[in-house]
Image: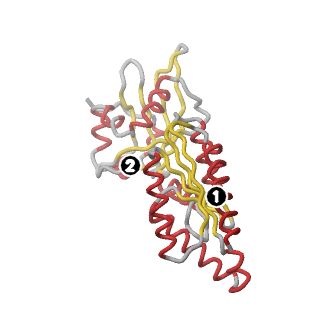
Amino acid sequence: MRPLSPPSTIAAFGNHSKDIMYIFEVRPVYRFRYISPSLDEHIGVGTVKASYADPSDCFDRIHPDDVEILMSKISGNCNYDEPFLQRWRTNDGTYIWFEEYTTPIYENGEIVAVQGVIRNMDAAKARQQELEQLCQRDTLTGLYNRHAFDSLIEEMISSEAIPLGVLTLDLNDLKRVNDRFGHIAGDALLQQTALCLSRFSQEAFRLGGDEFVIVCQGYTEQQCLHLLEQLRSEFLKHDLSIAVGFAYDEATTDVVTVFQKADQAMYSEKQRTKSLV
């Protein structure tokens, strides 16, 4: 069945627009009254034709995590004043981010159709994610920074309790190196330390100065202790003097308390090291 002719104004813009424009009927049955040809340019050749024949071909391309957005949009249970962000699967299997502005059409108080404009936001989303990553990273060492650590704390507060180990680390010689050889040498020492940490953990953070922390989510206590021994061996290999503290909880969402216990253990080790000098 051929699609119904779209309003001339929509077609006049849509047929020449890089954005995707559409009119979709919700009642009496689901069907597209109009889809701009640009859908094929973004998703792949044949998508427009297939979507006219069966709207589910288009809907099935929406990322599983974003399907709820689609359902709220066509049911009227959403805020149409806000844009919808969603991911669609292309013909080659990759997903592209889109931003959609939708207008509902009502008859007798019931939603009968929606029309909208969809813009490819993939490049903008990639830039946003890149900036977010930069905000989460320490510029000197490349490790996660204090902001990332604070974000992790917030995430874990609202999550289920899990086994959690925390290692806190503090360089013993940074001030001496800075005073004697300058900050370039001190920076090199910090970078070497970060390199050692990143070899053994994907969740290593530089909190600032010479303070580091490793968060071990879902680890057993034995796995944490094994990691600690690996790190001590690595530090010895590179002649790094680092005080380390460790704390563990079998089931928690409270990173802060475990961190504080590890930090106290690290401080005690640092004091013992000083007393031997």
Residue 248 shows up from this direction: yes
Side of 32 relative to 203 (left or right): left
Give residue 65's position: percent from left, percent from top: 43, 37
Residue furthest top as drawn = 108
Q: Position of residue 196 (x, y in %)?
A: 49, 69
Image-quadrant location for residue 7: top left
Total tally of numbered discs in the picture = 2
Pick the quarter of the image with the N terminus: top left
Please tell me which of labels 1 and 2 falls first in the chain.
2
Which residue does the numbered mark 2 point to in the structure image? 95
The furthest residue to the bottom? 181
* CA neighbours of label 2 inside 10 A, class few (<14), some (14 to 19), many (20+): some
* Most foreground residue, 238 or 204: 238
Q: Are marks 1 and 2 in contact (CB under 8 Å)?
A: no
Judge from the rendering whether residue 42 lies leftward or rightward of residue 72; answer left or right. Answer: left
Q: Is residue 12 visible?
A: no
For marks 1 and 2, give the CA distance: 45 Å
**Tag shown at residue 266:** 1
Along the line of sight, the residue nearer the viewer: 261 or 21 = 261
Mark in the foreground, 1 or 2: 1
Residue drawn 50% across the image and 20% down it: 111
Provide residue 274's location: percent of width, then percent of height: 70, 69
